[in-house]
Image (cartoon, coloured by chain):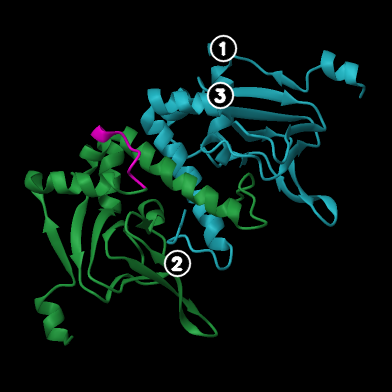
Chain colours: A green, B cyan
Amino acid sequence: MSLDRKVIEPELKLLGSGSAFQAQLLAMLQGSQFFGDFPAAEIETLTKYVQAYSVAPGTVIFRESDRGGFMCLVIEGGAEIFKQDAKYGSKRIGQIEPGKTIGEMALVDGEPRSATCICPQQSTLVMLTREQFVRIIREHPALSVNILLKIVTMMSRRLRQTSGQLVDYLQD
Amino acid sequence: MSLDRKVIEPELKLLGSGSAFQAQLLAMLQGSQFFGDFPAAEIETLTKYVQAYSVAPGTVIFRESDRGGFMCLVIEGGAEIFKQDAKYGSKRIGQIEPGKTIGEMALVDGEPRSATCICPQQSTLVMLTREQFVRIIREHPALSVNILLKIVTMMSRRLRQTSGQLVDYLQD
């Protein structure tokens, strides 16, 4: 793909917006592991803050060290996670299936990404940006609490799985 | 200390309650690293949901594998963290100074504690239980969002500090 084609055909194509598209977004969110157990009314509220994109094969969603600003929910296709290794260069360390999320931490701390995320095939992603999450906190605090509880639970499981990690001892 | 004395003199003594004690609690929370940057009105709200205890030297605050239900803020004295080691038995792995918190994760997931926490000297602790946190979520969602954001930020820093940890890749 030449640089010109890339410019003419953006790699992220907005799939739809407005109330006409809302039912489709609702179905996407309800089918996911992250949002699937949220109350129906909250998922409906959430559709007003997220956007769905069609992603061309090979698109880099974010790069290691980027200052991130969004989380993604994979609807169709998939994503792969790569990490730079001092010894071996870029190494594939994980795969994200439809229904799963990626980059949740960026919603909260906006720190540099710890890995690179690429969609190897044609994919559909739903994105929630930090800006929109801040709006949700202000306008729908109960919904933001549920999103945060989900993120904390995932992080806690991750910390507990890692041998020697002590989640009761979070020194800062 | 005999078992009888323990029964007669509880190791955790409630320091005070009600509106008369509220100003003291407010000062304790405002002086802490965890709550110090919360809006003044939120800290005032919080005083209605927490309790302060005087803790006798040698008191076990929680034990590794306990199903936890509270977080603690150390006001005076201090706490020490021990972890069971298959090879060497109980090992001291950390120390909590006044102003710092411990056991934050228990508010969210109520999973077994990953370490044991003991107050070696006479200490003052402020406790927030899971039950009270659930009440805060319902009654003051904006305050619960700030508590959760603080916990996520601490966990994220912890995950990022640990070499090889990938906070953008929280598989569950």
A10 lies above or below B35: below
User: Helix, strand, or loop for circle 2?
Assistant: loop
Residue A4 location, x and y as percent?
12, 85
* Residue type highlighted by circle 3: Val
Task: For mark 3, give the secondary structure.
Answer: loop
Q: Which residues are magenta?
A: A34-41
How crowded pointer 1 is (Cα within 10 Å; few <14, some 14-19, many 20+) is rated as few
Q: In this orientation, does residue A65 appear?
A: no
At 50% across and 19% down in the image, what residue appears? B48
Observer-nearest of B54 and A61: A61
Give the residue furthest to the right. B2
Amino acid type, label 1: Ala
Task: Give the residue at x 63% y 34%.
Answer: B68
Q: Nearer the viewer, residue A77 or A163?
A: A77
Residue carrying label 2: A114
Which residue in the structure is indicated by mark 1?
A: B20
Which quarter of the figure is the N terminus of chain A placed in? bottom left
**In this image, B27 relative to A79: left or right?**
right
Q: Residues within 10 Å of mark 3 (few under 14, many from 20)?
A: some
Residue B20 versus residue B120 in the image, above or below: above
Q: What is the CA distance from the residue labelled 3 to the residue labelled 2?
A: 36 Å
Residue at the spot of label 3: B50
Residue A167 screen position, x and y as percent:
61, 47
Q: CA distance from mark 1 to mark 2?
A: 49 Å
User: Both on one chain, marks 3 and 2?
Assistant: no
